[in-house]
Image (cartoon, helix red, strand yellow):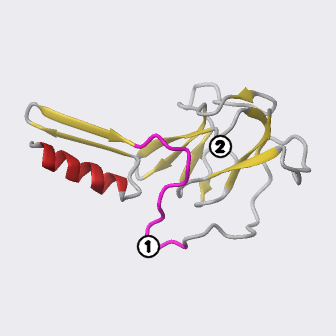
Amino acid sequence: MDLDRIKELIELVSASDIAEFELEIDDFKVALRKFSAAPRPVPAAQPAEAPKAVAHEAPAESGPTSHDDDRFIQITAPMVGTFYRAPAPDAEPYVKVGDVVEAGQPLCIIEAMKLMNEIESEVRGRVAQILVENAQPVEYGQPLFVLEKL
């Protein structure tokens, strides 16, 4: 495979909602993965913005409920999929309420189209609330966590 074909693959993956891509032809293998906690581009069939107000079920774990000031940040789902708190069914959750997390630290996984996408913290902070139950479906833009900035 020549360099132009590889560049074309990179551009296609970059412009799509694909988080990971692997291609293996004979003895040639290429793997591409996006490393961004920012929301990925939304497919044309979905709305460009997250809904302003969506009713969600009770949180899996909760802490303080007043998050009106700038000390708190919501981590939202960058895609539609299934929310998992741990990397495997028998593993400990990535985070619990009260844990201190660093920017870039994994908080959960969202499974979309059989791909496991790690969702990372955008800031250093303390987990104030976990807003989704394990193994529940989530929508694009749905709040997953509330972090208190440190």
Vertically, is 101 above or below 116?
above
The quadrant the C terminus occupies is top right
Residue 87 point in image, percent of width and height: 54, 31
146 left or right of 30?
right
For disc 1, the neighbor class at 10 Å (few under 14, some 14 to 19, many from 20) is: few
Kind of residue at badge 2: Asn
Residue 122 point in image, percent of width and height: 64, 41
Residue 137 point in image, percent of width and height: 59, 55
Mark 2 residue element: loop
40 left or right of 59?
left
Kind of residue at badge 1: Ala
> Is 138 in front, or is 46?
46
Residue that label 1 marks = 44
Residue at position x 75%, y 33% from top? Answer: 125
**Which image quadrant for residue 6?**
top left
**Magenta segment main secondary structure:** loop
**Residue segment shown in magenta:** 34-47
C-alpha distance separating marks 1 and 2:
28 Å
The quadrant the N terminus occupies is top left
Residue 42 colored in magenta in the image? yes
Residue at position x 72%, y 70% from top? Answer: 52
**Which image quadrant for residue 148?**
top right
> Is 78 in front, or is 102?
102
Residue at position x 29%, y 54% from top? Answer: 11
Give residue 5's mark. Answer: none
4 left or right of 142?
left
Residue that label 2 marks = 134
42 left or right of 62?
left
Residue at position x 67%, y 29% from top? Answer: 102
Mark 1 residue element: loop
**Which image quadrant for residue 143?**
bottom right
Vertically, is 54 above or below 149?
below
